[in-house]
Image (cartoon, grey):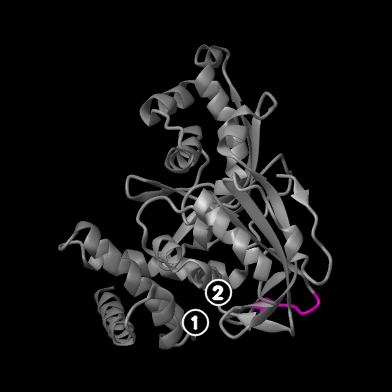
Amino acid sequence: MARQSQKKPNLPKSNLKWSPNTELVGLEFELVPQADTSVYPQYAIALHAWFLDQVRSIDPELSAYLHDGESEKPFTISALDGEINSSGKEVQLSASATYRWYVTALSRRVVQCMGKWVQKLPKEINLRNVPLQIRSCQMIHPTTYVHLLNSEHGETVTLRFLTPTSFRRKNHHLPLPMPVNVFHSYLRRWNHFSGMQVDQEAFLAWVDDCVLIHRYQLTSTKVLAGKKGAVTGFTGAIEFGLTKVASEQPKFQQLFYALGQFAPYCGTGHKTTFGLGQTRLGWSSQVTSNVPDVQIVLAKRIEDLTEIFKAQRQRTGGDRAIEIASKWATILARREMGESLQVIAQDLEMPYETVKTYVKLSRRALLTNFSYN
């Protein structure tokens, strides 16, 4: 995505404008801490909440929909990109460093809301009492779905996954960029927001038959998954190409390239509104996860606890048992890391007393597990 530089120090908000017909747009923020500071490992939840609060100040109904809507989310946000290290049980941010943060919009209504927002951007992001000064804001090339469909392209689609990426498959996580999973991820959003519906079953069958992996360079890591749970995600790069028979379905071939152009706007996989699945065009030989050690440790602890609690609840079974096991694991692991019950309750949007009760129940369940082993 091409960028229009907006790097003057006083935030040239009046220049951050796009056509009323725009359906996709992204913003790149440069953020600077006012002092060396630390934030808790799941700080992406606070970024998510801060953004929705900004939307609420402009369009409360839209904010409620973005928060509660069960359908595809018409936006993505990234985690902080920059010099991030672990400091004890927290993530360390340096006052001498600049951090980049990305927000994209996938629907005209969100684009219009962001157009109003950038005209009166606040001076800082408040990340749970950690202020990050907004030094600059750049506009990532605004466009439309029709333009993506008709845009020029090369012979292959090459993608970089900047943050851990994973897919849901049969109630489990799949940390591999298999063509059907990758393009299914994009097609869901395309069908929901573009106004140009495509037969999902037919297209994915074509992908399965015609899309090849030319090369890849990937690594995997445990990662925190939004408000609860942990997954194994991959980062790195992959190049997709087409078989000779792909051209027998010219509309699907055209869509294949359009979805590749769509990827940087919509992200890849799930939890893209909590920093996962950040995607860019082009190849990179660097394969790094850029996940602080403390986040990896917390993600592994949540995963281990989830398996323990799921095993204990096997007799009840079902999605409800899995959901409770994940909540217990997330709450207990974060409490073990020293986070307050108030912060955990706020992040998970649960009553304080319920979180307090879950901590007691999960600790009791953990002791029971140790006694059996």
Q: Quadrant of the C terminus?
A: bottom left
Residue 63 part of the magenta-drawn span:
no
Q: Nearer the viewer, residue 344 or 233?
A: 344
Q: Looking at the image, do the residues carrying marks 1 and 2 touch, with CB atoms under 8 Å apart?
A: yes
**Numbered badge on residue 337:** 1
Q: Is residue 258 above or below residue 85?
A: above
Q: Determine the residue positioned at 67% across, 77% down.
A: 124
Q: Which residue is mark 2?
A: 41
Q: Determine the residue positioned at 62% across, 27% down.
A: 150
Direction from residue 18 to residue 328 in the image, left or right: left
Which residues, given as a range, are shown in magenta?
91-96
Answer with the quarter of the image where residue 70 lies: bottom left
Category of crowding for the residue at label 1, using alpha-carbon neighbours closer than 10 angstroms: few (below 14), some (14–19), many (at least 20): some
The image shows residue 296 at horizontal and vertical percentages of: 55, 66
| Count of all numbered marks drawn on residues in the image | 2
Q: Determine the residue positioned at 34% across, 78% down.
A: 350
Mark 1: secondary structure:
loop
